[in-house]
Amino acid sequence: MDPESWQQRWREGRTGFHLDRVNPNLAEFFPRLDPRAGEAVFVPLCGKSVDLEWLARRGHSVIGVEVSPIAVESFFTEQGRAPVHRSTGHCERWEDPPICIWCGDFFGLCAQDVTPARLFYDRAALIALPEELRARYAAKLAALLPDTARGLLITFEYPQEAMAGPPFSVSEAEVTALYEGAFAIRRLARRDVLGEHRRFQELGLDTLIESVYLLERGEHAGDSDRS
Ligand SMILES: C[S@@+](CC[C@H](N)C(=O)[O-])C[C@H]1O[C@@H](n2cnc3c(N)ncnc32)[C@H](O)[C@@H]1O
């Protein structure tokens, strides 16, 4: 799906991916990033995720990017925030500290836009993209972040022929191929979550594996541990 199709989806309210509660994987695994007090977290393709607010309430500054103005405006309204927005040319910046969301195309960001984020959190971002865009996404994410970057990546795996994405199925082998040049990769969790997703059961899936990966750069990059 291209950015226009996503905007259309938001206009039509087809946002079944949105969770009204904090993603349990964020609460469980965020400490594995060894976050420093107050440090910034980059959240690509953030939608109107309440995870942004969860991070902010823990004292982190949050930098999101989201192409749909409906999603961005809804996020601030639903969280009772009053953002200031200004246009910067390539994107519109909506901000109510400590949360800033770039409303525009992820692929149009530059490293300065996500500075000083070292941490990142990818829930339903990589897997929102079709295969032909995923390598570009992974390379862009790596290029935006500094040498000390580390983050969480959450994926789904299921027989792709059983359902058209999004979300798309992304295997561990693909995660390795996409990121091993830039990050050490460690899988932190892997479980079948089909029972929690009635709409995927109704579409005929018989398995839906959710994995959580820790991606770490710097001295760890290159030595993947998929235990
Ligand atoms: C599956 S949703 C996930 C949203 C959020 N991460 C969550 O957990 O609820 C993917 C989001 O990415 C946005 N998106 C898709 N392509 C984008 C792009 N190129 N730049 C910025 N946002 C994009 C869509 O509008 C959509 O809100």
Image (cartoon, rainbow, N blue to C red):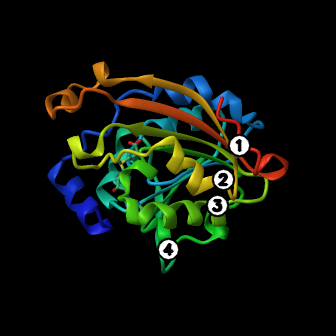
Give the distance between the C-alpha atoms of the residues marked 3 and 4, in whole angstroms: 14 Å
Residue 31 image position (x, y, % from top left): 68, 28
Q: Amino acid at mark 2?
A: Glu
Q: Earlier in the sequence, mark 3 or mark 1?
A: 3
Give the distance between the C-alpha atoms of the residues marked 2 and 1, in whole angstroms: 7 Å
Which residue has dot 4 on it?
Answer: 108
**Residue farthest to the bottom?**
89
Q: Earlier in the sequence, mark 2 or mark 1?
A: 2
Q: Earlier in the sequence, mark 4 or mark 2?
A: 4
Quarter of the figure that contains the N terminus: bottom left
The circle drawn on residue 142 is 3
Residue 54 image position (x, y, % from top left): 53, 32
Tell me the residue at 16%/32% (across/down).
204
Q: Amino acid at mark 1?
A: Ser
Give the distance between the C-alpha atoms of the residues marked 3 and 1, in whole angstroms: 16 Å
How many callouts does the rendering have? Answer: 4
Front tag of 3 and 1: 1
Front tag of 2 and 3: 2
